[in-house]
Amino acid sequence: MQRLRWILILGNAALVTLLGSSLSATQEPVTPAPPPSAAASPAGTSSSKPSKKKYSHANDFLIRGTVFNEQALSFPGVQLRIRRPGEKKFRWESYTNSRGEFAVRVPQGADYEMVVRAKGFAEQTRAIDAKSGDYEGNLVFRMQREGGDKK
């Protein structure tokens, strides 16, 4: 019974010990060797490379809001794409959650353009001013069917 407890506690190290010799209750647990990645990297190499500065989200601007369908119900799975005005390529993309809500973090200090689209609905575009950083409201999108048809 004691042998089984040691195997459960020590895992693979105990199994190797058990196969090599019989395990008694007086033996100390075997400590596993350090991972190969830590042992393989020499200590002097990390100082020779320039360290990459970590990005802080402290000054980011949070664009948040809710998307509703034509019946004023929350609209999950709507695609949100954000870019700077005048650019062709979108830099950020997200989707609304199960309650039609979204929140996208972008760098503060610029203007942005948000395009909201869903299959079968007219695409909507909204300009966003993220220069000041003191915006506390929520964007609200009310999607309409393409062509104005009510189905």
Image: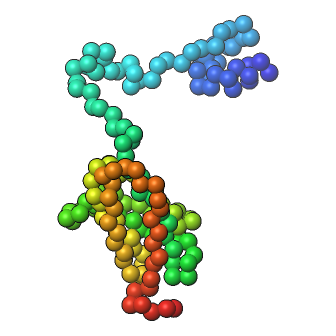
* 6 shown above or below 71: above
Q: Nearer the viewer, residue 144 or 94?
A: 144
Screen quadrant of the N terminus: top right
Residue 50: percent from left, percent from top: 22, 26
Residue 92 located left or right of residue 67: left
Q: Nearer the viewer, residue 19 or 39?
A: 39
Going 57% across and 15% down the picture, which residue do you hit?
A: 31
Residue 78 in view here = yes
Residue 65: percent from left, percent from top: 47, 63
Going 38% across and 81% down the picture, which residue do you hit?
A: 122
Q: Nearer the viewer, residue 76 or 127?
A: 127
Going 34% across and 72% down the picture, which residue do you hit?
A: 125
Residue 16 picture quarter: top right
Residue 19 in view here = no
Number of residue marks:
0
Going 52% across and 67% down the picture, which residue do you hit?
A: 100
Residue 35: percent from left, percent from top: 45, 23
Residue 29 picture quarter: top right
